[in-house]
């Protein structure tokens, strides 16, 4: 079969990574047999790929690390959502505005008995913000060393 050099070049990444099917591998090897100079130009890549082949891209440790990283980032996203929601609720419930005849007036804790509820919201939001920034610091420390 007559294959152009461009087609074989397109097949080389799959061939060198070991992901090519048997038919594709046979086609590339036949082309190498017909064009020995072409194979020699890619011999260095074969050595590099063989050296890197010791580390499999689908290693279980890498999958576990990826799952763990996704889980940590998901927790950080959830904490950001909860912390911002609690903070905004605490701020919103703390103030009320009265607009009438004259300048607008701001009332602090306008509903009787809502003070403890606002304090609970503020405390919960502080805990969530602390956890959010703690996770961010841990991520930066592990990535940057």
Image (tube, helix red, strand yellow):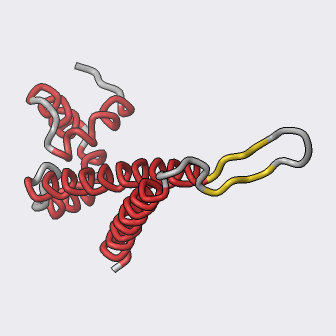
Identify whether 2 is placed above or below 20.
Answer: above
Residue at the image point whose x is 12% and y is 30% from the top: 21
The x and y percentages for residue 132 are: 38, 63
Along the line of sight, the residue nearer the viewer: 59 or 21: 59
- In the rendered image, which quarter is residue 124 located in? bottom left
The x and y percentages for residue 129 are: 42, 63
The x and y percentages for residue 62 are: 16, 56
Residue at the image point whose x is 40% and y is 50% from the top: 82
Along the line of sight, the residue nearer the viewer: 51 or 129: 129
Identify whether 77 is placed above or below 142.
Answer: above
Identify whether 114 is placed above or below 100.
Answer: below
Residue at the image point whose x is 48% and y is 52% from the top: 114
Residue furthest toward the top? 1
Which quadrant of the figure contains the N terminus? top left
The x and y percentages for residue 112 are: 53, 50
Which quadrant of the figure contains the C terminus? bottom left
Horizontal placement of 5 versus 72: left or right? right
Along the line of sight, the residue nearer the viewer: 15 or 43: 15
Residue furthest toward the front? 112
Residue at the image point whose x is 36% and y is 65% from the top: 127
């Amino acid at each position: 079969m007559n294959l152009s050099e461009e087609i074989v070049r397109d097949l080389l990444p799959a061939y060198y990574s070991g992901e090519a099917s048997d038919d594709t591998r046979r086609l590339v090897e036949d082309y190498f047999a017909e064009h020995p100079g072409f194979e020699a130009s890619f011999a260095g890549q074969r050595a590099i790929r063989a050296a890197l082949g010791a580390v499999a891209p689908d290693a279980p440790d890498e999958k576990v690390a990826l799952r763990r990283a996704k889980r940590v980032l998901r927790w950080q996203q959830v904490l950001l959502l909860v912390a911002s929601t609690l903070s905004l609720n605490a701020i919103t419930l703390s103030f009320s505005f009265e607009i009438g005849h004259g300048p607008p007036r701001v009332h602090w804790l306008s509903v009787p008995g809502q003070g403890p509820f606002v304090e609970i919201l503020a405390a919960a939001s502080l805990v969530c913000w602390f956890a959010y920034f703690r996770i961010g610091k841990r991520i930066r420390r592990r990535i940057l060393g």
